[in-house]
Amino acid sequence: MRVLKVIELVGTSPNSWEEATKNAVDKAAETLRGIVGGDVVGQNVVVKDGGITEYRVDVKVAFLVEEGGVG
Amino acid sequence: MRVLKVIELVGTSPNSWEEATKNAVDKAAETLRGIVGGDVVGQNVVVKDGGITEYRVDVKVAFLVEEGGVG
Amino acid sequence: MRVLKVIELVGTSPNSWEEATKNAVDKAAETLRGIVGGDVVGQNVVVKDGGITEYRVDVKVAFLVEEGGVG
Amino acid sequence: MRVLKVIELVGTSPNSWEEATKNAVDKAAETLRGIVGGDVVGQNVVVKDGGITEYRVDVKVAFLVEEGGVG
Amino acid sequence: MRVLKVIELVGTSPNSWEEATKNAVDKAAETLRGIVGGDVVGQNVVVKDGGITEYRVDVKVAFLVEEGGVG
Amino acid sequence: MRVLKVIELVGTSPNSWEEATKNAVDKAAETLRGIVGGDVVGQNVVVKDGGITEYRVDVKVAFLVEEGGVG
Amino acid sequence: MRVLKVIELVGTSPNSWEEATKNAVDKAAETLRGIVGGDVVGQNVVVKDGGITEYRVDVKVAFLVEEGGVG
Amino acid sequence: MRVLKVIELVGTSPNSWEEATKNAVDKAAETLRGIVGGDVVGQNVVVKDGGITEYRVDVKVAFLVEEGGVG
Amino acid sequence: MRVLKVIELVGTSPNSWEEATKNAVDKAAETLRGIVGGDVVGQNVVVKDGGITEYRVDVKVAFLVEEGGVG
Amino acid sequence: MRVLKVIELVGTSPNSWEEATKNAVDKAAETLRGIVGGDVVGQNVVVKDGGITEYRVDVKVAFLVEEGGVG
Amino acid sequence: MRVLKVIELVGTSPNSWEEATKNAVDKAAETLRGIVGGDVVGQNVVVKDGGITEYRVDVKVAFLVEEGGVG
Amino acid sequence: MRVLKVIELVGTSPNSWEEATKNAVDKAAETLRGIVGGDVVGQNVVVKDGGITEYRVDVKVAFLVEEGGVG
């Protein structure tokens, strides 16, 4: 039976939450195969000197557990 | 007295959650009149081969109930 | 086996949340049979010129699905 | 762009929540095409004379919106 | 000891939730110093004549309380 | 761009939650212009000697931020 | 040290949620001393033949634990 | 006016959450009359030596308060 | 099959939430055997004349139901 | 009728969440009279070089609105 | 001092949520020792051609952290 | 772009939730670099023979993902 594992990442971007999510998924894809999707569970911004410097997203990334087990 | 109905849709877009929401509202507006707004209740992404292929949004769309009733 | 469908309505009243709920149920009962109850999931007020003009209630109305199906 | 609609049903069964969910999905499938899944948002039991007579499940059923619109 | 205050704002934009958040932060920065960030707690859209006219974001903005107290 | 501020008040009344909400909005309207609505986020009662002496409501009141800033 | 106990009751009334809450508190006060308050955690209506027959409230009632212990 | 009391139990079973719920309801029915239903508010499993030994369910059981009061 | 009951208490202490929780558990242990644990579901403070006079904790205490039933 | 206002603060301390809460209440009491209590809505820690440097608490502080209005 | 780690898995089964949970725990037990339990945080079904093909469960699995550390 | 990973740990202590959190962070810091903070998502106590033997905290620990990927 198929089993998936879900990990929580925080992605960041100076431009948008879409790009922040893409950055988190890209980072995950460097070492994980079988990613099927991501679920946004939080969104925030970092502010410095009165201006937004970073869009941040908390994203739960799900991927298929391969032969080697859940890690 | 005014009564509104609220339906839940999932909009999708290859580009952004804003466009995904617009697609859901556009589809609703094809057959519903009197839409007043939409409330985002979930956001996620579909991933294939390590890349995001789809931004998805769960949106609750509210519209005025017309003479014909809640349906 | 018995199946119920749950729809979300927003009822309004100038006087109370009870009346707002009654208005939502009354509107639903114009076209739906077999309503068994309603669950309040939100309450708010509309304010104009510093005074409340409308009590609003988000109510999930449940009713028995008849022969014709859910859709 | 693909749009899905999500409806909330309550399924019932004298035996299990799995069967209650199956009953809700079966009823939905009588009149809806393109159902992709269901998300359980509540589970309860009805008790009579000290014994469980019914397992009930609140399930949000998602399906593809066809040409005709969201209904 | 450092104390922060958190206020809730609703930002609006015709284009995106990022811009709506920026508008809320910009407005806050007109009169507040020491803003450190914002946490998104709600997102919705206003719809008129079947089209989205406004993206709205509920954002909790946190800033350092200065000598003068919490206000 | 329009920005709103949201403040949380607790209104009280010996009679009803509607009146408690009205009392909170009335108090807010003494010093704030541009109130657009209130969202109920909690309801409770105070009991003394076995009887209810006070209906209380937690209400989030939203108003337009004027020229002077978020305060 | 003072300890309170919290019990959950469902009050009912044909007229309003205030009266339903009063009925629950009155019933509790028949056998409990030292009730300090009640917190509303749910509100719903029972519907028969298309009309509301009962307003129901889920209320958590708190009272001081006396010498005899938590029961 | 009818008043119900709601108590929280944890039922256990080596086989299923349905049986765990039945065990909790059966135990409640030994000393309580007028049980009307149960609402599942949590589900978990106990694991020993890599295998599930117990299915557990948190269930809120509601029953009519009889003449004697809420206890 | 083992069944547990869960009751909600509010413990208080002038010093800490740990002590408030201990006070609630101690009070429960005066009349209940078989307590297995407590789950914190709320924390607050009482303030008088600008200073904290009481730390309060809402704690759900679980214990094994003995032969005599759920009470 | 009595009206309270609720503001959200973040208190910090190198030692404990109790002290962090005390610091937030103390800061509030510098400029506000009539504080009645605080409700903890979040707790976290800041970590530097593998060690906790700060306990932080999000606390909603409630106080009586005086003659001058809600601010 | 004992420390546990909690990971989130999604188990699947064509038959039941109990079996889906068992499959997730079995997969975890292939590579992890010291599993103490699992907490269900979501349940859903996959539907194809109008029929349920898969019961899915989101389960948080807790296990003792061994000498080697959490990561 | 900076990416963080968030893992969930359960820390334990015979004395306080602060110490339990410290124990979880210390254990994490044995094998992880770049920890920035921890967010408390649950607090409970273990009780034996009527007394608290362990304070437990569920804490989400966030750390910077290094070159090697999310693991």
Image: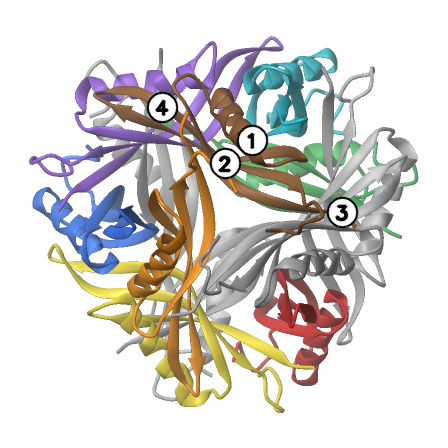
Chain colours: A red, C cyan, D green, F brown, G purple, I blue, J orange, L yellow
Chain under disc 1: F
Please identify, in this view, whether the residue under mark 3 or under mark 4 is nearer the observer: 3
Instruction: Look at mark 4 in the image and give the residue it sits on.
Output: F54
- Total marks drawn? 4
Instruction: Indicate which disc, 3 or 4, sits on the residue closer to the N terminus.
Output: 3
Instruction: Look at mark 2 in the image and give the residue it sits on.
Output: J69
Q: Position of residue D9 (x, y in %)?
A: 64, 33
The residues bearing labels 2 and 3 have C-alpha atoms spaced at a distance of 24 Å
Q: Position of residue G11 (x, y in %)?
A: 38, 20
Query: Can marks 3 and 4 be said to lie on one chain?
Result: yes
Query: Can marks 4 and 2 be said to lie on one chain?
Result: no
Tell me the amino acid under the disc marked 2.
Gly
Tell me the amino acid under the disc marked 4.
Glu
Chain under disc 4: F
Please identify, in this view, whether the residue under mark 4 or under mark 1 is nearer the observer: 1
Tell me the amino acid under the disc marked 1.
Glu
Instruction: Look at mark 3 in the image and give the residue it sits on.
Output: F2
Instruction: Look at mark 1 in the image and give the residue it sits on.
Output: F30
Query: Can marks 2 and 1 be said to lie on one chain?
Result: no
- Secondary structure of the residue carrying tag 3 is loop
Q: Position of residue L42 (x, y in %)?
A: 38, 59
Which residue occupies 21% across, 39% down?
G4
The residues bearing labels 1 and 3 have C-alpha atoms spaced at a distance of 22 Å
Quarter placement of the N terminus of chain L: bottom right
Residue I58 visible in the shown view: no
Please give left or right for residue D2 compared with residue F44 in the image: right
Which residue occupies 52% across, 73% down?
L6
Query: Can marks 2 and 3 be said to lie on one chain?
Result: no
